[in-house]
Image: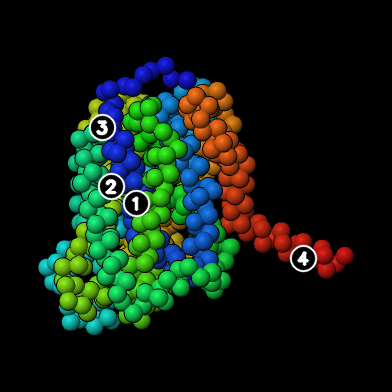
Amino acid sequence: MSDQPTNSSRGQWGSRAGFILAAAGSAVGLGNIWKFPYITGENGGGLFVLVYLVAILLVGLPIMMAEIFVGRTTQKSPVGAIRDLSKRGSPWIMTGWLGVLAAFVILSYYSVVAGWAMHYTWITMTEPFTGQSADEISSVFGAVFGNTTINTGWHVAFMVITIGIVSMGIHRGIELCAKILMPTLFLILIALLIYAMTTDGFGRAAEFLFAPNTENFSGKSVLEALGHAFFTLSLGMGAMITYGSYLSKKESIVSTSIIVSILDTAVALMACLILFPIIFSANLEPGAGPGLVFVSIPIAFSQMSGGAILAPLFFLLLTFAALTSAISLLEVAASYFIDELKWPRLVAVLVTGFAITLIGIPSALSGGTAMFGSGFQELNAPLLAYLGHENGLNWFDLFDYIASNWLLPLGGLAIALFASWRVGGAARQAAFCGEGKGMTIYFVWLILLRFLVPIAVILVFLNAVGFLDWFFALFATAVEGG
Ligand code: PHE
């Protein structure tokens, strides 16, 4: 257990609102506005949304509380926090390492998508798509994805901005940035939502999103919904441990976690309610994949008055959302070196930021043909087929797949088990219940973390490796045979 009080040289949030905005800034990101709409489209809509909401409530929220608890209690970044709560050399510390690894992997490709958002902000501002046909506009995304210079250039630019903000520290860098960007983001979202409600496609979009629809929904969809619950709430890699470590022990874990989760879910649903009406009104395909926002938004805005202003505004929003999340990813990586190896913040941020920029280069080159070496493809054909990428290796998709479907759920599972079984019960209960208040919530939380979360995550893993299919087939044969 840490006997250290708040370590002021590490920095601390200026206020509770500052923490909530920064944590919401981490949670609300490309995951909500770029990824959630396109995976919802690919998985058929309503049923997927429902599974996702259940995953947020029963799995995501309890893990967020666990992470903030671990961070707030120890006032340390993941590796140190877990060491403090277990003991030196304990295998649980690997959870912290896994988080640092996930930060490197995720930020490397996240920054490439953020680069697309910056590029689209720029092109919609300088050469609006007004008057172009839907086909012409769609082809722009393909050209951007295939242009390695554009991708690498914006990726590097985005990383430089992220590095700049994180190097300024918790209070003056991260919190200040979140305080300005998050309210702006909400205003832009509301304006766009009001517009979307006036379009013809709004009714169809609402039906697509909220009526349970089994078409395109499969076992893999459940894995994806759960994986996305981790991704969107920034869980499973210690981001919330790190942010929680700068939180004063006076602040409530439960209420801050609930507010952050509600804000995040609201933004994801709003993003869908903005995008799908536009997609349906313009007769576009909801399952279009990662290009969905980059194609549908420019098409919609090319056809309406004021679009020349709204389109860049939307992409600016996407850039801001990405920035506040990228900041938290870099903070996880850097805080390890700051806390564990005692590096000065500036050095830690520059070194980790530079390394991540390099690791991101293959993702930035993913759309160019150079990466699709045929020898590699043949060797790895079964893996590629399993990932649904028979046509070539794409670092970008591979990184996203590994991080969201494996690293984060695995990290989340470890944190859930650690916080609910390993950490001393008295300290845990004291962190949640002041003077006997909050006992019910505490026990529900504990039971979810101890039993439901591990079972859900393990089932999803078994399903992903095909074990459940195999098991059910075996079961069916046995029943028929008997
Ligand atoms: N939650 C962020 C998003 O939705 C992504 C993220 C994942 C950020 C993990 C930090 C840690 O875009």
Q: Earlier in the sequence, mark 1 or mark 3?
A: 3
Q: Nearer the viewer, mark 3 or mark 4?
A: 3
Q: Nearer the viewer, mark 4 or mark 1?
A: 1
Residue at horizontal 25 percent and vertical 39 percent from the top: 174
Q: Nearer the viewer, mark 2 or mark 4?
A: 2
Whether label 4 touches label 1, CB < 8 Å: no
Q: Residue at the top extreme? A: 3
Does label 1 point to a residue whose CB lies under 8 Å from ligand 1? yes
Q: CA distance from mark 2 to mark 4?
A: 49 Å
Q: Which residue is mark 1?
A: 28
x then y, percent, for residue 304? 20, 77
Q: CA distance from mark 1 to mark 3?
A: 21 Å
Residue at horizontal 21 percent and vertical 65 percent from the top: 120
Q: Which residue is mark 4?
A: 476
x then y, percent, for residue 273? 36, 67
Residue type at numbered disc 3: Gly
Does label 3 point to a residue whose CB lies under 8 Å from ligand 1? no
Q: Earlier in the sequence, mark 2 or mark 1?
A: 1
Query: Which picture quadrant has residue 135?
Result: bottom left
Q: Nearer the viewer, mark 2 or mark 3?
A: 3
x then y, percent, for residue 63? 49, 41
Q: Which residue is mark 2?
A: 324
Q: Which residue is mark 3?
A: 14
Q: Earlier in the sequence, mark 3 or mark 4?
A: 3
